[in-house]
Each structure stands twice: as C-alpha cells, then as structure tokens.
C-alpha cells in the first residue's frame, strides 16, 4: 500500500461554512470582474452555478465603487445570489494590478460598511499600506469574525525565497490572518524559487493559511500544484478571470482531483 500522503497544511486552517482554507485540497476561488451593475449580477448568477469554494468580489472593477451606499447595496445583492459560499472582498490598488484608481476613502468606507453588516468572510488589504494602517483596520474587524488577507504583488519579477518569507513575515506581523503573495516568474527557476519561498514559509510559520500564485504562462503550473508546497487557495476563472493565466473552474477542479486525492 502507498503511504498516506498529506500535503503541507497549516496547523490552524480557517473554516467558512463548508469551505476549509488550509484543508486537504486547495480552495477554488472565482473572481467577479464585471463593471456594470446588471453584468455583475449576471456574472454572480453564472459563478454561483459553478459551485466554487469561494468567490472573490473584485470591487475595484465596479462603476459605482466611489459611491459607498451603492456599493454596499450591490454587495448585498451579490450576497443573496452567492448564498452560503464565502466571499473575499478586494478593492485592489491600481499600483498592484487593480483595474482602476479607487480613492482610499471609498475603499475603506466600503470595507467598514461591508464588515459591519458581515456581508463577506474575508477582506484583502495590501501590505503596501504599512503595518500601522493595517493594524488599525484589523482592530475594526475584531469581533466581526472576518479574516484579514494581507497581500503583496510583484508584477515584474520573483523575489528570492528568503525575501518571499520576509514579505510574508511582514504580512503576519501587520496582522494578517492569511498571508498572500503574487509574483511574476521570468524563468522556470523563478517558479522553483517561488515554491521554495512558500514552502519555507509554511514550514516556519505553520499556523497561517497561504494564498499565492505565480502569474504569466511560466507560472501557471503554480495554480495547480501550489498546494503541494503550501498554497491553500487557487484562483480560477468564471466568466472572465482577473488574471489572464487563470484557468476555468472545471479544468482546475479536474486537475486538483488528480493531484490531491482524498
Ligand atoms: O491578488 C490576486 C491574485 C490574482 O491576481 C491571481 O494571480 O490569480 C487574482 C486576483 O483577483 C487576486 O486578488
């Protein structure tokens, strides 16, 4: 008999209903990337049918994002459609491949309102805001049950494995419940460096779930095999991906079933 194999999982997985971030199989998360209200709701319906483990609401794409009242109403509508599937709320800054410039005022007023109504299970904030701002936002989430994802994106290159661990360490120090890093490999060696960095983080900071991906065609494989090296969530496309190298949910599910048999 083959020995039972377990991928390197965090010691403290996070559960959101039926979705376990840090369980046997990486979570499949599908982003919503439409811009206009009717299209966003259509997309949410389509994505709900795909039965993802998590939905990422990329509100930086929204036409109405500067209007907090309208954005909260939109999120309530999406929540009704998505139902029990946990939602990650992201207003990505333009400097880290966000769709457009969104004012910090609009972003954090929206985040606060979404947290107050507990419309989402996770919220994403970039490490670029710095420890002080992240910690103060984290304080606002206390007692909400909402997890804070702290994210770092290198859009041009791949830091060394040591640097990757240090970046993720800074995310945790700033208050992340989940450490997140996205890099751009420019060679196959960079993909190995990326995976080495993630695995080293997992071995050293065993408590924390990890969200990570390597972009571009060279990095695509990380979206499937990353779980073997400590990645707990992979993004897959629904109607349209939020990154050109995301693969459709059905493809990702099929591959994951082979790579992570239970
Ligand atoms: O930061 C990330 C990672 C991502 O860019 C990807 O590489 O799949 C997808 C984004 O929607 C998400 O917020």
Image: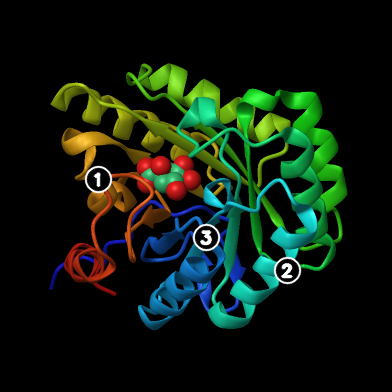
Q: Secondary structure at mark 2?
A: helix
Camera-side mark, 2 or 3: 3
Location of the N terminus by quadrant is: bottom left
Q: At which x and y percent is residue 107?
A: 72, 43
Q: Secondary structure at mark 1?
A: loop
Q: Where, by quadrant of the figure, is residue 187 drawn? A: top left
Please rate how many residues cluster around mark 3, counting C-alpha atoms within 10 Å: few if below 14, some from 14 to 19, many from 20: few
- Residue 90 sits above or below residue 205 on the image: below
Image point 34% across, 19% down: which residue? 156
Residue 95 in view in this figure: yes
Q: Secondary structure at mark 3?
A: loop
- Residue 239 sits above or below residue 200 on the image: below
Distance from the alpha carbon under mark 2 to that under mark 3 = 13 Å
Camera-side mark, 2 or 1: 2
Q: Is residue 221 left or right of residue 40?
A: left
Camera-side mark, 3 or 1: 3
Q: Where, by quadrant of the figure, is residue 229 drawn? A: top left
Q: At which x and y percent is residue 19?
A: 51, 72
Q: Where, by quadrant of the figure, is residue 119 drawn? A: bottom right
Residue under label 2, please give it: 73
**Mark 1 CB near ligand 1 (8 Å cut):** yes
Q: At which x and y percent is residue 90?
A: 59, 49
Residue 245: which numbered mark, if any?
Answer: 1
Distance from the alpha carbon under mark 2 to that under mark 1 = 31 Å
Distance from the alpha carbon under mark 3 to that under mark 1 = 24 Å
Residue 36: which numbered mark, if any?
Answer: 3
């Amino acid at each position: 008999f083959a020995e039972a194999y377990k991928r390197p999982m965090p010691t403290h997985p996070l559960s959101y209903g039926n979705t376990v971030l840090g369980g046997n199989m990486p979570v499949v998360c599908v982003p919503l990337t439409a811009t206009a209200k009717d299209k966003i709701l259509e997309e949410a319906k389509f994505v709900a049918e795909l039965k993802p483990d998590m939905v990422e609401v990329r509100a930086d794409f929204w036409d109405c994002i500067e209007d907090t009242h309208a954005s909260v109403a939109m999120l309530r509508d999406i929540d009704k459609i998505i139902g029990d599937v946990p939602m990650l709320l992201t207003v990505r800054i333009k400097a880290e491949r966000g769709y457009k410039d969104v004012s910090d005022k609009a972003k954090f007023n929206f985040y606060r309102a979404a947290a107050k109504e507990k419309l989402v299970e996770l919220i994403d904030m970039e490490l670029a805001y710095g420890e002080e701002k992240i910690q103060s936002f984290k304080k606002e989430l206390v007692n909400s049950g909402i997890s804070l994802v702290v994210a770092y994106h290198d859009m041009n290159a791949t830091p060394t494995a040591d640097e990757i661990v240090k970046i993720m360490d800074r995310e945790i120090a700033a208050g992340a419940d989940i450490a997140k890093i996205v890099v751009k490999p420019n060679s196959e060696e960079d993909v190995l460096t990326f995976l080495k960095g993630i695995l080293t983080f997992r071995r050293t900071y065993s408590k924390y779930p990890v969200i990570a991906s390597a972009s571009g065609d060279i990095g695509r494989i990380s979206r499937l095999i990353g779980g073997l090296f400590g990645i707990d969530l992979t993004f897959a496309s629904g109607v349209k991906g939020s990154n050109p190298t995301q693969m459709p949910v059905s493809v990702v599910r099929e591959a994951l079933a082979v790579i992570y048999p239970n």
